[in-house]
Amino acid sequence: MLNRIVQRRGVALLFVALTIIVPNMGAAGSGGGCAPGVPGIGGPPAALVGVWRAQFVDPTFGPGAIELVIKADSTFSQQTNYAAGAQVIVYGNVRVLPDQAILRLDTLGGVPTEQCSTVGCTNIIYPAETHNYSLPNANALTTHNINCAPDQCTYNYARAT
């Protein structure tokens, strides 16, 4: 069925269909991952491979820093550190639609694994993220999480040296 969608509507519709049909493909515990062999979906272009760092201010948690590592083997890791001391690390697979400037981070796991309070602990399930991206130059990457408002979740990364 998906092959017919690709032939009739193009890769963009396939990506939308995959996102709607399997919204958390690659999320922790789902067994998902990269989508080899699907036209238009592939590993990261060489320009995206590397270590990227960004600063941000979260309206709830305050200032923070992100280090995003994208590898040529279609894997990623992302470490987020908040000024108050909290740290979140996620990892998984990367899918890229370069023609539409879409970067998909399919999260396979992360740390911490639980959120605890006085009433007990709950497992944390890290969702996959879809970002629009641009590469203004060889040392700059801008991403915007498509699930956020236009004025939120935009990160301006610099290539780490």
Image (tube, grey):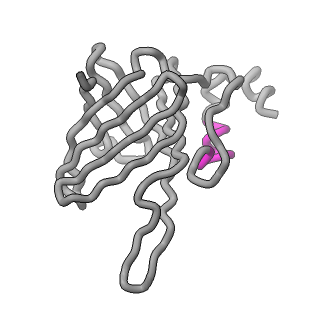
Number of marks drawn: 0
**Which x, y percent locates residue 3?**
79, 27
Residue 47 forms part of the magenta stretch: no
**Which x, y percent locates residue 13?**
64, 30
**Which x, y percent locates residue 150?**
33, 41
Left or right, 75 with respect to 112, comes to: right
Question: In the image, what residue occupies the spot 23% across and 53% down?
Answer: 82
Question: In the image, what residue occupies the spot 67% across and 47% down?
Answer: 31
Question: In the image, what residue occupies the spot 18% across and 51% down?
Answer: 63
In the image, 73 versus 61, the foreground residue is: 73
In the image, 98 versus 34, the foreground residue is: 34
Magenta part, dominant SS: helix
**Which x, y percent locates residue 144?**
36, 37
Q: Which residues are magenta?
A: 16-25
Left or right, 126 with respect to 23, comes to: left
Q: Residue 135 occupies which quadrant of the picture?
A: top left
Left or right, 42 with respect to 80, comes to: right
Q: Quadrant of the C terminus?
A: top left
Up-down: is 25 above or below 139? below
Question: In the image, what residue occupies the spot 66% across and 38% down?
Answer: 17
Q: Quadrant of the N terminus?
A: top right
